[in-house]
Structure formats: structure tokens, C-alpha cells
Amino acid sequence: MSGVCVDRVAVVTGAGRGLGRAHALELAAQGAAVVVNDPGVAVDGTGATAGPAQDVVAEIEAGGGRAVADTSDISTWAGAERLITTALNTFGRLDVVVNNAGITRDRMLFNLAEDEWNAVIGVHLTGTAAMSRFAASYFRDESKAGRAVNGRIINTTSAAGLYGNAGQLTYSAAKAGILNLTLTSALELARYGVTVNAIAPAARTRMSAGAPGLEQGEGFDRADPANNSPLVAWLASAESSAVTGRVFEVGGGYVGLADGWSHGAHAEIDRRWNADELGAVIPGLVQQSPAPTTCFPIPGLVGTVGTGPAAQAASR
């Protein structure tokens, strides 16, 4: 089998449906052996079934690829460690982790429940951190043992994490946390031969169902989840070794870098500011600065997507 990921071993979380499924299929088509992780939960994280992960494995094997199903709950450190161990026991090594798993429980701040916050943070942010932690330990041990490491961690953020989105407070906070987890782990793991990058994908999935601008039209389907997966495969390959600590926006035929926080307009004096002085200073700084980028429209996709479901409901 040929491709940019030949002989590499990849773990993809949330790979039973949507974006994760598309990533797993693309990685396999590019020559990787894939651990297809998905506990088969509903979009809100409830329930469980092994079917989705097994179905994707069957698709990969039917195409001549290698894959194994795993239903570990990566929102726990024990589950994440078990998943990494599955990759090592099945394929003898690990090269790539794609942190894709996610759920949604959209709420506005004023009606957010504790269990909803914990559930979403658990899968998105804790799950990404836990998977990265055990992958990092493996890569570090390999490096210290004198073996060449060409490791990859690819995280999934979103436009909501980059720019915020009313009605998706918890989801946005988790995805923003993943951004800084990406930047910091890229700094920490570079010495061991590991790159860490993030993607902010745009696609029609269960989590974005019904959002305007993501409908399937005639011709090129810009909202097809598979449009995002070639970037994941390239980032997973040995070719991407010089790219780390980057965030990519991707969707349709669009791929681009998202610029992070930078030092903006400022004022400075040679003493401590008095509070009553700042009223004459801050408005000018704000005027000198560009307005914050909004979450939508999504680059590369037609149409304009509105705010999250909870915000839409609250406005009625």
C-alpha cells in the first residue's frame, strides 16, 4: 500500500462517525494501521454501543487496510492509557494520536448545570489531555532509549474555541483549552521528536446537524467531513516534521492558519496608572485595535451559520 502514512500506527478517538470516521478511513487509505476508538455514545454522551467502531474497522479491512476497534472512555485517564496500550499491543508501536472525540450539551451560562459542564469538559479537554499525556510518555521513553521518534499529536479545536459562540459556553471553553494544550505540549515535546498541532474543522456532523450553511447541495459538497481528513493525514505523516504548535482552519476546499493572540495597541507611563486616568486611555486603545473575529461564517463553506442551538432557543 502506498500513501503518506505507510507503516505508521495511528489512534483516532471518536472515530465511529463523522469527522473521526473520515480521518480513520483517510489514514488507512494513506497506509496507516488505525486504532478506531469510539464508545458509540449519543451526541450528548449517553448510551454506548460497539457498533460504530466495528463498522469503521470493517470498512478499512474491506479496503485492504489494518485496523482494530476500541471502545475505551478517553475522558478518564485509565481509559486513555488503555487505548494507547491497545495500539502498542496490537501493532507494536505508536506514531500518531488524533484527538477528535467530542459531545455537546449546549446551554447559555445562566442555565448551565454542573453535570453538563463536567461531561463536555471531560470528553473534549480532559480526554485530549489524557490521550496526549500517555502518548507523550511513550514517545519520551522511546527517545530516551535511543530509538528514533517521529511522533504526531493532532488535536481538534473549533471556530467556537477560537472566537467564542453564544449558546456553547462549555464547548467553547473546552475547545479554547485545547488550543493552549496544543501550544504548550508542542513546546514540551519538540525535543523528543514529536509535533503537536490542532485543526478547527468545518463539517456536517451529528454535532452540527441542522446548522444553516452546512446542507448538502449540488456539485462539490463543501460540508463533507472527509474534506478535512487529507490535512490530518499530512500532519500525521513524516513529511510534517517541521510544523508544530500551529492551528489550522479547514473545511470544504479551504485550509489556512489561524493566528493566535498577539500584543496589541498599548499605552505606557513611567509610574503606576491611576484608575481615573484610564477612562481617557482605554477607549483609544480599543479604537486602534481590530474588532474581534466572529465565529461565523466559516471559511471555505457557503452560507452563514448562526449561533448555537441554545442561543437560538433563548432568543425565542
Image: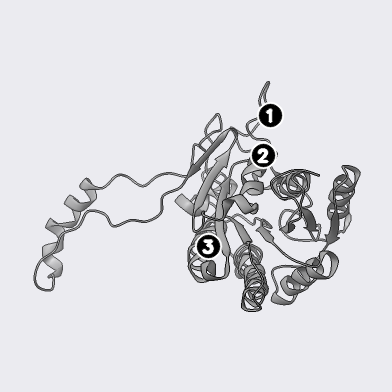
Question: Residue 254's image quarter?
Answer: top right
Q: Which residue is mark 2?
A: 204
Asked whether the residues under the numbered discs 3 and 2 touch, taking CB atoms below 8 Å apart as contact, a structural biologist would say no
Inspect the image, locate mark 3, and give the three-letter code of the amino acid beneath it. Thr
- Marks 2 & 1, CB-CB < 8 Å contact: yes
Q: Position of residue 286 (x, y in %)?
A: 23, 50
Decide: few, some or many residues near mark 3? Use Cα within 10 Å; few <14, some 14-19, many ≥20.
many
Q: Position of residue 11 (x, y in %)?
A: 73, 60
Please determine whether, in this image, residue 30 is positioned above or below residue 115.
above
Q: Secondary structure at mark 2?
A: loop
Residue 49: x and y in percent read 86, 59
Q: Is residue 157 visible?
A: no
Element on which disc 1 rests: loop
Q: Amino acid at mark 2?
A: Arg
**Gap in angstroms between the C-alphas marked 2 and 1:** 8 Å
- Marks 3 and 2, Cα distance to the nearest angstrom? 24 Å
Q: Which residue is mark 3?
A: 182
Which residue corresponds to the image point at 49% horizontal and 36% vertical from the top-left? 297
Dot placed on the residue nearer the N-terminal end, 2 or 1: 2
User: Going from the N terminus, do you reach mark 3 or mark 2 first?
Assistant: 3
- Is 134 positioned to the left or the right of 163 in the image? right
Q: Earlier in the sequence, mark 3 or mark 1?
A: 3
236 w.r.t. 315: above or below: below
Q: Check the picture and name the quadrant holding the C terminus.
A: top right
Left or right, residue 242 beside residue 34: left
Residue position for label 1:
216
